[in-house]
Amino acid sequence: MRLIAEKLGGERGGQPVFSDIDFSIDSGECLMVTGPNGSGKSTLLRVIAGLLQRSDGEIRLEGGGEEFPSVASASHYLGHLNGMKPAMTVGENLAFWQDFGGAPGMEVGEALEAVGLETVGHLPFGYLSTGQRRRISIARLLVNLRPIWILDEPSAGLDRESERRLSALMSAHLGDGGLIVAATHLPLGIEGAATLTMNEGDEGATEREAG
Amino acid sequence: MLALYLRDIRLGVRAGGGALTGVLFFLAVIATIPFAVGPDLALLARIGPAILWIGALLASLLGLDRLFQADRDDGSLDLLILAGDRHMLALTVMVKCLAHWTASVLPLVIAAPIFGLVLNMEPIGIGATALTLLVGTPAITFVGAVGAAVAVGLPRGGLLVSVLVLPLAIPVLIFGVSASYAAVNEPNPFMPPFLILAALTLFLAAIGPVAAALALRFSAD
């Protein structure tokens, strides 16, 4: 499976945020998107996921087969917001996304264990701390099988131990042949990840280096 | 899809969901009318169906703005839109509308006969009004979904949704009330306005979710 972007351009409110972004990542590869605040990392991720219309270029998925005809159908998107209902328990939230998303992966209990929160399943999501909420939404990535993970600041609010656990989960996903596109300003310790540096301004200000 | 339906009902019924707020607002509207019109029982009975319909219309508009905004605020809306290849977004919207109707509007329909007693209506009039509400209120929800989807990006879109939706809900109101009246006033036929009401609901059920889905897709930022 291969995710390819060609001359990708994005805009927000009619203002071009980035343009001419090229990359291609294969199964088992990770692309780290870095850059200062306002350089368009989140916009790029939303364009890749298809939540924002691209202004230019193309993004496509090759080798997805019948199960994953488009990038959106093959992707988990973890944005700034966690996508969980505060009034429902953690277990109910995860079970809902598992049910709704199809292609079930881990059981809810297993996923909670994987993020080290197996004891909070019965608590309303609203009772959790910021870091715990983040970890629950990381657990959401595990309950449905998706080859592509699009992660926007996945480590926001996490303590060191949880960051380490997140890196391990990401490495395991890559090991299973998954793809990851992550925007972050923290090194997440993924071996052999490519880096896409976004600079403020636009026109061809991006470069790619092998990490 | 069933999971989404159950989730939304659960959220609607739980504390802060707004299901009870609608019924209380409905009660408030119905309870103030006799004070305003005076203790003329015959008059109350005559305007009863109209009052019930207006009360139910306003009460069902009350919680509409949260239909998508709650999902947008916590990021669920992004995930629902992303799942568009598995579950067509229009279908997702449809299910959300049905859940909203079940949790927030159906209680109004159930409460309407009790409020009809307060307005001194005849049993047959109460029955007809409840039946027209049952058939007509889904149309208001489906139209309301379009308004809610258009206003989803606005921080205080509640009033805007009501104002956007109200003109489109007027035909529903007209045929709902005229069918209710026809049940009580002998010469007028009940079926024609009632069937038009049912047709309006079916029509809006078909186009409302599609329009709302389109609006949601382009509202993402």
Image (cartoon, coloured by chain):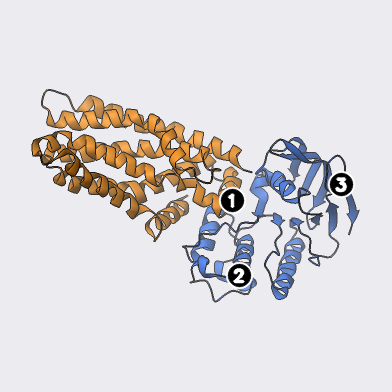
Of residues B65 and B97, which is closer to you in this image?
Answer: B65
Task: From the image, tell me which residue sits under label 1.
Answer: B79
Query: Pointer 1 indicates a residue of which chain?
Result: B
> Residue at the location (41% across, 38% down)?
B162
Residue at 22% in and 45% down:
B32
Secondary structure under tag 2 reads: helix
Q: Is residue B9 left or right of residue B79?
A: left
Specify the amino acid type for callout 2. Answer: Gln
Vertical side of A70 occupied by A194: above or below: below
Q: Residues under labels 2 and 1: Cα distance?
A: 20 Å
C-alpha gap between disc 3 and disc 2:
34 Å
Tag in front: 2 or 1: 2
Is there a contact, CB below 8 Å, between mark 2 and mark 1? no
User: Which amino acid lies under the numbered mark 1 shown in the image of this protein?
Assistant: Leu
Residue density around tag 1, few if under 14, some if 14–19, many if 20 or more, within 10 Å: many
Give the image location of residue B152, x and y in percent: 53, 43
Chain assigned blue? A
Badge 1 element? helix
Q: Nearer the viewer, mark 1 or mark 3?
A: 3
Residue position marked by numbered label 2 in the rendering = A132
Nearer to us in this view, A169 or A152: A152
**SS for tag 3?**
loop
Badge 3 and badge 2 both on one subunit: yes
The answer, for residue A1, to whether it is visible in the render is: no
